[in-house]
Image (cartoon, rainbow, N blue to C red):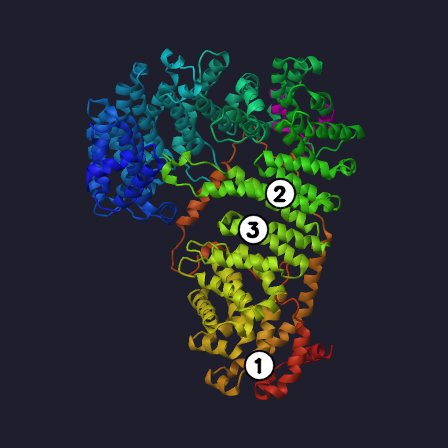
Amino acid sequence: MDVNGLLQCFASTLDHDATTRSHAEAQLKEASKVPGFLGACLDIISSNEIPENIKLSASLYFKNKIVYGWVVSAYSASKNELLNHGVDADEKPVVQDMIIQTMLRCSSNSAHCLRVLRPALKTIILEEYPKGKWNDLLPKSLELLSNDDINVAHVGLICLSELFRTFRYKENDDRQELEKLILQYFPDLLAYANNTLLKEGENMNDPKIGELLILILKIYKFVTYHDLPFTLQRAEFFVPWANLFVSIIQTPVPESIMNITDIDQRKHNPWVKCKKWSYANLFRLFYRYASQTLSGRFDYSDFKTLYMNEFLPQLLSLLFQQIEEWGSGSIWLSDESLYYVLSFIEQAVTQKSPWKLISPHYSTILQHVIFPLLRPTEETLDEFENDPQEYIHRNLELWNDDYSPDIAAISLLTTAVNKRGKTTIQPTMEFVIDTLQKNSGDLNSLSLQNALNIEAAFRIFSNILDRLVAKGSPYANEIEGFSKTFIFPFFNSQYGFLQSRACEIASKLGFVEFKDPSTIETIYTGITKCLNDASDCLPINLSAALALQTFVQDAYFQQAMSESVVPIMQKLLELSNQFESDSIAGVMQEFVEQFAEQLQPFGIELVNNLIQQFLKLAIDLNDASNIDPTNYMNGESLPDESDKQMAALGILSTIISLLLSFENSIEIVKSLEQSFYSAAEFILNNQLDDFYREVCEFYENSTFLLRDITPVTWKILELIGECNNKEDSMVTYFLEDFMLIFNNIFVYGSEELQKNNFYCKIFYEIYNNTNIDEDSDFDEINIIFDYSQKLLLSLGSQIPAGIRESILQNAITCIVINKTDLKKHIVFGVTTFNAIIASMVSAPLDTLKFVYNHSCLPLFFDVWLTVYIPNYKRIYDIKLSTMALLNLIGQLPPQEISQMSIEQVLPTLGNSLVHLMCKYPQAELELKEKRKEFTSSALGDDIQTPWSDAIELNDDDDDDTTVDERTFENYLELMKKDNGDGNFADGLTFDDDETFDDLEEDPLTKSILDDINISAVFKTSMGELPTSNGPVYQSAFSNVSSEDQASLANILGN
């Protein structure tokens, strides 16, 4: 590798001229494919003679190549061309030998390069160390750590931390070697942390030493994250490490750090982060291993006793002291540290013995910790005025993605009220009322300080309101009076944040039964005033819109809004254009459903406006999806587009609701199809698979309303076909979504399909792109065979022989390999069999021969005739099997029957046919009743949790672990129990008690067999069979019982 040439390339990537940069990047892509490239990069990075910016460029390129190319994945290869060429296997040992030496060279004078190389080292260690392919890593790391040079020791600790990271998600039984490492090396690590790094706070002015201590704290975090090593459960190990965390917490932050005026810069100081990680480690030990839990996943009773009895009381005293000093301003805590302190106390609230220690302090915590944290800061007020979207996320939607102490305070408050309500609700409400009484007054002369206190009290009230208004709550009758006195006047406040909060609280009053008729009028007047706020303040408008949604079904609101539905909808559209969230789309959707008649004259215009909004978001999402991830230093830097995605999904859902409101206006539906085409075209052309389902839902509904396939829908099918033919197509991956539109094309477009091979070819190509292999689970198989059988039924004898044989081959293979599951997994079995049965409808003899030639006929007949047919409940299954049986009896020549040795099966065919026709009338009646229920019943009210059903802990109770924690643990257990028996389908997908009731029949979806009058078909066929295929007919019905003969005569006579 020409190092000088490579050096020139990296230099040119920093050139101001775009052409020069582009040429250099192209050269690098080619060079990166040549073995020796990575070693040359490390030579450049190691050199002290090369400018720092060029070394940094080389570091970034090296890091990206390692992170995305050390183990090449389908994702990485599809996102970046250079990553299609993974790291050469022969070059990997060279890189492993060189990277640590390069990091040592960078440690003293190239800190930025060192930071960039760390993700690369992490990638290599995670992949190679667990496989035993880097055995000298541990001794080399320890050797570096013993060096007196702090920079060398730093690299040693980086290596050690990544080494111990490999144990992070393993349980003790799967990492027994870790116990030996802890016994051998953790005492020295602890001594190094105490005596060399922390040194009673002497080194806290040196950020580099703080970085080293962080790494030791993270090592402890990694080994205790998922399971607690047995060694660290012992008092002689736990107590010294816990004392280290406590010492770090208690050591005052030096003046040099406190003099950093930029809070963001201060909280990133390594010593401040040491405090954060100390709190975090203590919290996780308590939460995961020392708390009383339901699951018992990590029930280490001795450790729990040690932590709870000998350590926790003193730790709680320390935490109370910390927050008391923080509240008085004596100490400063970073947001992250405060977050963990409050989270710790919240967890302690749910435990019996800690709660006894916390309970006497609850009012103090409420008044001096929770209340101040919920009081708007200058930054909050600035966000309200200048960054309203961020204000909404942080203060109205309560996003918790940045260790915000106010979010932790709310979580502590709600846990205390919900889990210990008998002790906490009364003092909480007394404090709220007292605060509001002291600070409320003349709205026109209210001071800012009073307003901030009111906002904090409102946030407390808002977050416990669901508990107060719960059915059966002793406080429910007081909410109306409280709201009229303290909340509703602030619809007219001079402070916008209070107007917004008043609307937000009003949005939670939907379950309250107001006794005074004027109350609902006051709410309506206040909400609509805020919705049409002259200042067009986004938080006020949004809160008002969401409050409006709460009451949109209220009779007074509906009457009052009936004359202004269109202006309100226009305002909602305006808000949707301003704020990227699905919340406004939800309000619009509700309005469409409630005021469809009033909105119909503006429906097309409304849909066009929504489509323009969607396309604006979709273009941004498409641009974001095409970014090169290797241009980012780390994953966290990638832009988060979830807001846009949710907003776009909400808009599409609203459009679909609008479409459904025009069920009696055929021409408008056709116009809406045309309008929506531009959105569907953009989605399909750019393969925005997050929106495939919405496209299919729209055209599923439009074709159902029209009972026809219009030219627009055929064009959509063409776009799907083009999308399917792209190299990285995901059409078959999302086949279940596409079945929504495919089903209706098969139903309403069958005539066109019969004469237009161009459209048929699209369906054939989609089938050819499907794949069933050993990794396919039952869900995937079911979708493919659902598609296959409908393709066979729609196109019948027109299906090419190769497609038919492929379908049959796949079905037979699945049946044979999973034959023991056919009676157990009913949905899989019936759906797979139906693919063969559907083929019998159009080609009975060819199908039967194929099954016979693949030695599957006895198994097929046995399960079909003795297990499935006697238990069918769906109309679809009954019709399909009836048609297949009629064809078999009517078209099988006697000589073929003899050749396949199925003479003995013929009587069962006749009996099965009679059985099916006898049960058909009842099945048809049940489906009609289902359809009546669906069309006549309105959606039920939202479920309100009764006061008595809320999880209330007595003083002697402990809480369970969170649902998320239990779910994750149970998932891991389930994964461990997978026996990996090599079946085509993963048996874990289904419960063991699957029945024929699990075969869904949507009463609102039209089946491809719906228009077939099976009774008429049966009568006609039975009249023709004696003459068309007499010998087979006689054999089939020769053993019909007298009872079945009477039933048969009755069917034929009606």
In the picture, the quarter occupied by the C terminus is bottom right
| Residue located 60% across and 28% down the image | 463
Q: Nearer the viewer, residue 957 or 535?
A: 535
- Which three-letter amino acid code belongs to the residue tagged 1? Ile
Residue at mark 3: 680
Secondary structure at numbered mark 2: helix
Tally of marks: 3
Residue at mark 2: 610
* Stretch of the chain drawn in magenta: 456-481
Q: Position of residue 871 (x, y in %)?
A: 59, 67
- Closer to the N terminus: mark 2 or mark 3? 2
- Which three-letter amino acid code belongs to the residue tagged 2? Leu
Is 591 placed left or right of 385 in the picture? Answer: right
In the picture, the quarter occupied by the N terminus is top left
- Closer to the N terminus: mark 1 or mark 2? 2
On whether residue 950 falls in the magenta region, the answer is no
Judge whether 807 appears above or below 676 on screen. below
Residue at mark 1: 889
| Residue located 27% across and 39% down the image | 177
Q: Main secondary structure of the magenta part?
A: helix
Q: Mark 1 vs mark 2: give the one in front.
A: 2
Judge whether 475 appears above or below 896 on screen. above
Secondary structure at numbered mark 1: helix
| Residue located 67% across and 35% down the image | 571
Q: Residue 446 is drawn in which quadrant?
A: top right
Q: Do we see residue 137 in this rendering?
A: no
Q: Position of residue 338 (x, y in %)?
A: 46, 22
Q: Position of residue 887 (x, y in %)?
A: 58, 78
Query: Could you say which disc has been placed on residue 752 in the image?
Result: none
